[in-house]
Amino acid sequence: MYLREHWYVAALSSELETKPLSRQILGEHVAIFRTEAGAVVAFADQCPHRGYPLSLGTVVGEQLVCGYHGFTFDCEGTCVAVPGQDRVPGRANVKTYPIVQQGLWVWIWMGESEPDFSKLPSTPWLQDAERWSAVSGVAKIDATFDLLVDNLLDLSHETFLHNGSIGTPEVASTPIDVEVDEEMNVVRVSRHMASVECPPFYSRTTGLVGKVDRWQDIEYFAPGFYLLNARIARVDDPPLEDGSDDHAFHMKILYGLTPSSDGKVIDFWALSRDFCIGDDEVDRFLEKMQSSVVQEDVDALNILQARAEEDPHAREVSIKIDKGGLSARRMLTQMRESVSFQ
Ligand code: FES
Ligand SMILES: [Fe+2]
């Protein structure tokens, strides 16, 4: 069951052009495109005439023309022209979805109700190019949404699954603190590692060598947005009392978790940093590293899903490191139950 009344990432801004993109989101086929003036538009990907996917149509100016018989729609989804007659049938309009571009990501509202803009996640790290340099990507996973949540809420797996890039022994051996904000539907998981080896992911970009203090502060805004606040600094050099922390290196690792269809989820990621701003070489290095880290997760989740399908009732044993993931599972269950009671 999908949690519809929320914002989800629908696309990377860089994926959108006048040639429409077809994407299945929360079980619905959506056609997303830019008009020639640059506006971002999302339509139900089904022409009201004979059902041909509108993503196979053509953008002409500020309109989309169906690729089968030429029904033509404006950005509000209103059919403005049909072939062979002047009168346009009143029922020929197409459903549109509220959609918002925020820097590198484009968000969609899949709810039945009016979009709640107060719930749209704030992502200044993908928008403020003066202060933050960001790279982004997307991966499709043949696994359930819940398996991806589980993966992201427990980073102890970095030590084993991402050994050699971001994983070092201390990630798994350092205990976590977990906080749950039931009112706002947020799970926070913190792991502060003191005087630990700097993994290649950070040593190659920050120039720090030897031991560092490394913090991972996760904020999971259920259901669709995950933010990992990473802080790398020289040993024993915490933020100042007034909160300023300019002497440290900060990275924001963002994930947009978007259910696609049953057993399939789309994993949007972005990596933003407050150092080496505008450095293309660092961009390319981080893009390559993060793509391979994400691919390691994708491969693991695909395998887990296949095994879960073979044996849906396999027993699980949970330990302390699972507290964040279990809290997120509980929160999602409560959110789903509260929808089904409405
Ligand atoms: S199916 Fe689109 S115009 Fe016929
Ligand atoms: Fe991972």
Image (spheres, rainbow, N blue to C red):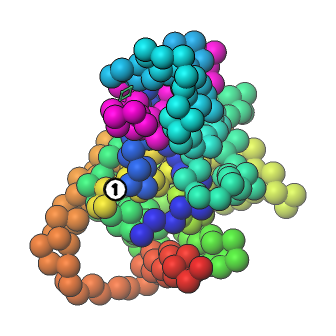
- Is 35 part of what is drawn in magenta? yes
Q: Residues within 10 Å of mark 1 (few under 14, many from 20)?
A: some
Amino acid carrying label 1: it is: Ser
* Residue 325 placement (x, y as % from top left): 45, 75
Magenta-drawn segment: 31-56
Quadrant of the frame with the C terminus: bottom right
On the picture, is 146 further left or further right than 342? left
x and y, in percent, of residue 315 in the image: 23, 87
Q: Is residue 199 visible?
A: no
In the depicted structure, whether residue 65 falls above or below residue 202: above
Identify which residue, 38 or 92, lies in the foreground: 92
User: Residue placed at 33% from the left, 22% from the top?
Assistant: 68
Quarter of the N terminus within the rendering: bottom left
Residue 6, x across and y down, in percent:
59, 59
- Displayed-image quarter of ligand 1: top left
Q: Quadrant of residue 112?
A: bottom right
- Check disc 1 and report the residue beneath it: 261
Q: Is residue 163 left or right of residue 280?
A: left
| Residue 195 sits in quarter | bottom right
Using the image as rendered, state which of residue 58 and residue 100 is in the foreground: 58
Picture layout, residue 39 above or below residue 168:
above
Question: Can I make out residue 173 in this image?
Answer: yes
Q: Residue furthest left?
A: 310
